[in-house]
Image (spheres, rainbow, N blue to C red):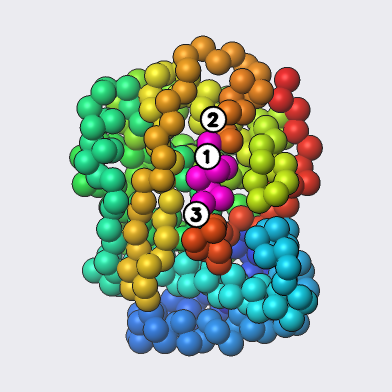
């Protein structure tokens, strides 16, 4: 993660260069997570101080989460947010390189999840870019049900997912760049009673796949496809968030269960009440964990067409 002129943004994971990432991976193998954190502090301070584009990409959210903060306070908000994000990248590498035994991970709401799966309609698990979702998602193996993740690598992304270190992927990946955005695959896994995980805080594809709802004092664009899938299949929607609860601990928390009406139709406006429920749950999360929200896009400045 040392500096690179060509990859300095933080809107994906395009910070640093391949050599810098290999240095961190080697340090993790030799000295472990805490040593990587120590180096990370220096690297993040460099980026936040000397690379304005990195700091700027944190401000879309921070200005709304901390509207009364002065410029000096906001600088340290940016530093803390970027440092927490860096720790997430370190942690997922640690899990892949040194194994899951490096962390204590709790799943809050397991019995409720099992009850929802017993309905036989599958489960739409909607999460967000918060905490280290990859570390915590590994705990879903306890559900003894196949888990599928809608996920696409960012163009230019340098950092490896944890399963790319270990070679063991606990879930099947569905690529949204595939045929019809992966819709047929997603419908298929739900009809088989499996778990489908999607990100509810970032739009993929056309802006018409999103609808504006209230979030942190403004109208922000959130995707609604997960709720349309739930409407078509009858699957319950579970909102779950990952939070880092200590230096070596995470929790996966069931925040809300959303029941979507059948046959919503194609309009994004019909899905808006359910999207608003997700946004409300996410707002509750960032109120409690303000520096663990890692969506660096301007959610409040995206054109949408909900027709």
Determine the secondary structure under disc 2.
Answer: helix
**Residue 238 falls left or right of residue 296:** left
Q: Residue 98 at what x, y percent from top left?
A: 30, 72
Q: Residue drawn 72% across and 63% down?
A: 67
Question: Decide: marks 2, 3 in contact (CB < 8 A)?
Answer: no
Q: How many marks?
A: 3
Q: Looking at the image, is 74 positioned above or below residue 120? A: below
Q: Quadrant of residue 238?
A: top left
Considering the whole magenta stretch, tell me its main secondary structure.
helix
- Of callouts 3 and 1, which one flags the residue occurring earlier in the amino acid sequence? 1
44 part of magenta stretch: no
Question: Decide: marks 2, 1 in contact (CB < 8 A)?
Answer: yes
How far apart marks 2 and 3 lie (CA) works out to 17 Å
Looking at the image, which is closer to me, 154 or 35? 35
284 part of magenta stretch: yes
Q: Which residue is mark 1?
A: 278
Q: Is residue 184 visible in the rendered structure shown here?
A: no
Q: Looking at the image, is 147 positioned above or below residue 40? A: above
**Residue 178 falls left or right of residue 45:** left
Looking at the image, which is closer to me, 283 or 196? 283
Determine the secondary structure under disc 1.
Answer: helix
Q: Residue 143 at what x, y percent from top left?
A: 23, 41
Looking at the image, which is closer to me, 156 or 170? 170
Q: Which residues are magenta?
A: 277-285
Question: Decide: marks 3, 1 in contact (CB < 8 A)?
Answer: no
Q: Residue drawn 41% across and 45% down?
A: 255
Q: Which residue is mark 3?
A: 285
How far apart marks 2 and 1 lie (CA) works out to 7 Å
Q: Which residue is mark 2?
A: 274
């Amino acid at each position: 993660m040392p500096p690179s002129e060509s990859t300095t943004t933080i809107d994906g994971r395009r910070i640093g260069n391949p050599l810098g990432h290999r240095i961190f991976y080697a340090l993790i193998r030799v000295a472990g997570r805490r040593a990587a954190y120590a180096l990370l502090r220096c690297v993040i301070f460099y980026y936040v101080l000397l690379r304005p584009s990195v700091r700027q990409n944190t401000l879309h959210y921070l200005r709304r989460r901390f509207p009364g903060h002065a410029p000096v306070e906001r600088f340290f908000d940016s530093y803390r947010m970027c440092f927490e994000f860096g720790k997430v990248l370190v942690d997922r590498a640690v899990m892949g390189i040194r194994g899951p035994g490096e962390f204590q991970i709790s799943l809050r709401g397991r019995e409720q999840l099992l009850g929802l799966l017993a309905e036989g309609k599958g489960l739409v698990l909607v999460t967000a870019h918060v905490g280290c979702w990859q570390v915590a998602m590994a705990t879903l193996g306890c559900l003894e049900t196949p888990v599928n993740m809608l996920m696409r690598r960012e163009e230019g992304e340098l950092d490896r997912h944890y399963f790319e270190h270990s070679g063991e992927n606990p879930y099947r990946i569905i690529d949204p760049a595939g045929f019809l955005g992966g819709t047929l695959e997603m419908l298929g896994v739900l009809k088989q009673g499996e778990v489908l995980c999607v990100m509810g805080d970032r739009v993929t594809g056309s802006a018409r796949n999103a609808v504006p709802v209230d979030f942190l004092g403004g109208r922000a664009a959130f995707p609604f496809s997960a709720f349309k899938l739930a409407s078509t299949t009858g699957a319950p929607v579970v909102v779950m968030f990952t939070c880092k609860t200590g230096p070596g601990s995470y929790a996966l928390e069931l925040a809300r269960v959303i029941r979507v009406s059948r046959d919503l139709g194609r309009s994004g406006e019909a899905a808006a009440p359910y999207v608003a429920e997700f946004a409300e749950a996410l707002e509750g999360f960032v109120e409690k964990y303000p520096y663990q929200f890692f969506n660096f896009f301007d959610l409040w400045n995206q054109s949408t067409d909900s027709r």
